[in-house]
Amino acid sequence: MRVLGVDPGLTRCGVGVVDGAPGRPLKMAGVGVVRTPADAEIGPRLLLVEQGIEAWLEEYRPDMVAVERVFAQHNVRTVMGTAQASAVAMLCATRRGIPVTLHTPSEVKAAVTGSGRADKAQVTAMVTRLLRLDAPPKPADAADALALAICHIWRGAAAGRIAAAVAKAPPARSAAAVVRADARPAVRQEHRP
């Protein structure tokens, strides 16, 4: 499976491509950052993010796209830019028919380091180790994008297998149907001589 991880941001949008499968060695196919000028208007910045992500999708042709789920921050301006960049990434992938999955920051940290409270340095160190890189990916947005891809390969594949198993299972009777079936009065037959 090839996954493009996207760490959304308006000034720096991290992108990283990882090939792999659960239980097998992972391999980085590419990593980078889509940048936009902080002093530009929002429209042209979003267009630059779109063009950058489209270029990555075209070059690497991932099977899946994993995007960091936007979480509430105190700085509304920052969270708005992050949400807008996230939406652009989801739109680009969906336009091409590529499935998109969102992962929370703590989910990604837990998948990569074993702790949902890991800091950026710990995530970067584990990404470097898991992908057997000679040097840590920089900036941190690039390392976070690779971490998202790794998280999806490990967690997303398991979630997909569970969903497939549930889809194949026979439909379960609802609790209400069971209660109704058990609540029917027993029919007593009398035999007259």
Image (cartoon, rainbow, N blue to C red):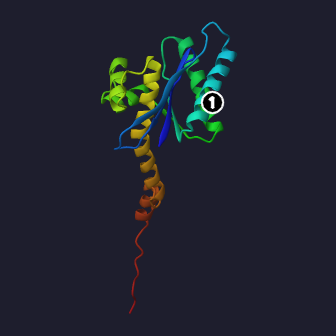
Vertical order, 7 against 64 (above or below): above
**The quarter of the displayed image where residue 88 is located:** top right
Vertical order, 178 against 162 (above or below): below
What's the residue at 44%, 30% (across, down)? 148
Q: Could you say where residue 19 lies in the image, as x and y percent from the top left?
A: 45, 39
- Crowd tier of the residue under label 1, counting other residues whose Cα lies within 10 Å: few below 14, some 14–19, many 20 or above: some
Quadrant occupied by the C terminus: bottom left
- Residue 193 in the figure: left or right of residue 87: left
Vertical order, 85 against 20 (above or below): above
**The quarter of the displayed image where residue 92 is located:** top right
Q: Could you say where residue 159 lies in the image, as x and y percent from the top left?
A: 43, 44
- Residue 24 in the figure: left or right of residue 28: left
What's the residue at 42%, 25% (across, down)? 105
Vertical order, 102 against 33 (above or below): below
For mark 1, what is the residue? 54
- Residue 51 in the figure: left or right of residue 26: right
Res. 69 visible in picture: no
Looking at the picture, tell me which residue is in the foreground, 42 or 16: 16
- Residue 110 in the figure: left or right of residue 94: left
Res. 71 visible in picture: yes
Looking at the picture, tell me which residue is in the foreground, 142 or 168: 142
Identity of the residue furthest to the front in this view: 134
Q: Could you say where residue 135 lies in the image, as x and y percent from the top left?
A: 37, 21
Q: How many discs mark residues in the rendered view? A: 1
What's the residue at 53%, 42% (across, down)? 63
Amino acid type of the residue that numbered disc 1 sits on in the rendered structure: Glu
Looking at the picture, tell me which residue is in the foreground, 84 or 21: 21
What's the residue at 40%, 45% (across, down)? 158
